[in-house]
Image (tube, rainbow, N blue to C red):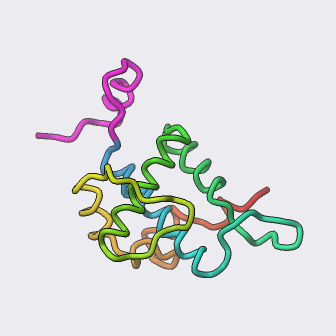
Amino acid sequence: MDKPSNWSRINNRANGRGNGWTEDETRALVRVYFEMLRLQKAGKLGRPTKANPGMVSKSAMVKVFMATHDRTKGSVETKLMNISASMEALGLPVVTGYKPLANRSKGLDDIVASMGFSEAHPKHPKRAAEIRIGDFLAR
C-alpha cells in the first residue's frame, strides 16, 4: 500500500482525521535530535547570551522545525521525547531535557537505529543543506 501524500495527511489533519507523522518528517526530526546531541557534546547547546552568543537553544531548533513541517510545539517536543526513549532503548545518549516517554513505536526505534549518528553529522553531504547551525542561532 502506498504511503499517503503530504497533501492527504495535511487534509486529514484539517478534517480531524489524524495527524500521524510521516517517515520523512520523523527522519527530519531525528536529524535535528542528532544535531542537538552533537551541540550538547560540544558544550554549545543552551541559551545564547551576550557573553556566549555561539550557544544554540533547543527551542530555536524546535521553532525552525515547526516552521518547516507544519507541526505544533507540543507535537514536536513529544516526538523528541519519544526519540529519547528510542535512543535510551538502543543504549545511545539522550538530549538533556527530553525525558524519554514510554509510548514510542517500534518503527521509531527502527528509524533511529538505521540512521545512526553519521547521517546527522553536519559534514555529511546530504545533511549539510538541511541542517545549518546558523538556522538555529538567535538573531
99 sits left or right of 25 in the view: right
- How many numbered marks are there? 0
79 sits left or right of 64 in the view: left
What segment carries the magenta color?
1-20
Question: Is 70 one of the magenta-colored residues?
Answer: no
**At x 49% / y 46%, what residue is drawn?**
76
| Residue at the extreme right | 50
The quarter holding residue 8 reads top left
**At x 29% / y 57%, what residue is drawn?**
108
**At x 37% / y 18%, what residue is drawn?**
15
How far from the left and from the top, in percent, is residue 59?
64, 53
Q: Which of 119 and 112 is in front in this view?
A: 112
Q: Is residue 58 above or below residue 76?
A: below
Question: Is 7 one of the magenta-colored residues?
Answer: yes
How far from the left and from the top, in percent, is residue 3?
21, 41
**At x 28% / y 70%, what residue is drawn?**
113
Q: Split into 4 quadrants, where in the image is the N terminus?
A: top left
Q: Which of 70 and 108 is in front in this view?
A: 108
Q: Which of 82 and 20 is in front in this view?
A: 82
